[in-house]
Amino acid sequence: MHLLDWHDVAESDWTSLIEQSLLNGADRRRLENTHLGKSVGLVFFNDSLRTRVSMELAAASLGATSVTVTPGSGTWGFAWEKGVPMLGAEAEHIQEAVGVLSRYVDLLGVRLFASGTDLVKDMQDNMLKQFAAASAVPVLNLESASRHPCQALADAAVLTRHFSGQPKGKKFVLSWAYHPKPLPMAVPHSTLLMAARLGMNVTVARPDGFELDPEVMKQARQSAAASGGSVEEMNRQDSAMEGAHIVYAKAWGGKARYEDPAIEVRDRQAHSDWRVTRHLMALTNGGGQGKFMHCLPVRRGVVVDDDVLDGAHTLHLEQAEYRLHAQKAILSWLWERNKKSSDSGGTVSASSNPAANHP
Ligand code: CP
């Protein structure tokens, strides 16, 4: 059983993992050394602060050993193409690299961002699926081209805590923000799906040309219909903010980056005023009582103004903290589920259809 996306995970497991994350947050020594002797391999194809540090500490807290690998930096470079003679710079194929690592460890975490060159492959998370298919142990998605499940669970726990267990019915604005680079869609996709699943009334505010993946929008609407929430889209940031309980800012690139990057750059720059300011936050619920969220890292003065981040109405550091609590819950759950699966001689799949750059 892998965890590549929350989509195929049962509602009972999802809500239980939110609860476990909250319990871990309330008692940091909870679950201490419950998985002594286990080992985790963390493969980071891309940079990270929060995910890397919180995964290493989550494993240590459970009594497990972690090993972090940054491919091509102190390891061989990995080739991905199948059936192509490896005459380039890469000395090792991902098939052997993952095959070997999964004989050393009990779980593999992988961060593998979007290619930015193949829209279909990126939206379907094909490279992540290839990685998982080569592994003999559970694989945990540490942010792929299209999903960031660890961030989504941490954020769900933070929202549940902030609204005293009742996020349902609250207005959640997922706001596009300008960024000098065309960042991937993993965080906005997972954030939208998470808020819809919690039954929140979600508004996706983004300029025209910066729509999220239509399949993700459809999945979010279905999820909202089941949870009692709603999903709508707007192309104005100020109207979207009115009455919001939560403003979750995130930059992402337009689809045009895959067809004509120059057009995407032109369109993105045309919206460089999409930044969360104190004035916009004043439009939120209760005359400015709405809270600001961001997964981090965030560019001050570009995505959001300093006075919003430094003010009293923000949850961004709590979100980062809950990455640790959520990942302890996920590691423990994956190991327990896989133990049951191997004890019964069967296979359990949290992602029976495994899942499908943000700085
Ligand atoms: N939010 C998040 O995943 O942060 P890092 O990229 O630093 O891991």
Image: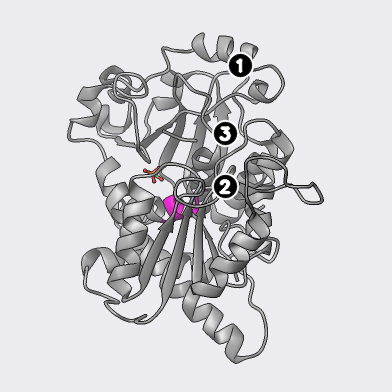
**Looking at the image, can residue 156 be seen?**
yes
Q: Position of residue 171 (x, y in %)?
A: 42, 39
Q: Judging from the image, what secondary structure is the residue with disc 3 in? A: strand
Whichever of callouts 3 and 1 sits on the residue coming sooner in the sequence is 3
The residue wearing badge 3 is: 232
Whichever of callouts 3 and 2 sits on the residue coming sooner in the sequence is 2
The residue wearing badge 2 is: 77
**Type of amino acid at the residue the image marks with label 2:** Gly
Residue in the picture at 30% in, 25% down? 281
**Type of amino acid at the residue the image marks with label 1:** Glu
- Residue 130 or 151: which is nearer the viewer? 130
The residue wearing badge 1 is: 264
Quadrant location of residue 39? bottom left
Whether tag 3 and tag 2 are in contact, CB under 8 A, the answer is no
**Type of amino acid at the residue the image marks with label 3:** Glu
Whichever of callouts 2 and 1 sits on the residue coming sooner in the sequence is 2
Per the rendered image, the range of residues in magenta is 148-153
Q: As drawn, is 50 to the left or to the right of 2?
A: left
Beta carbon at label 1 within 8 Å of ligand 1: no
Residue in the picture at 63% in, 40% down? 89
Q: From the viewer's perspective, is the residue at label 3 or at label 1 nearer?
A: 1
Q: Where is residue 71 in the image (x, y as percent from the top left)?
A: 51, 49
Residue in the picture at 40% in, 44% down? 170
Q: State the quadrant of the C terminus.
A: top left
Q: As drawn, is 163 to the left or to the right of 239?
A: left
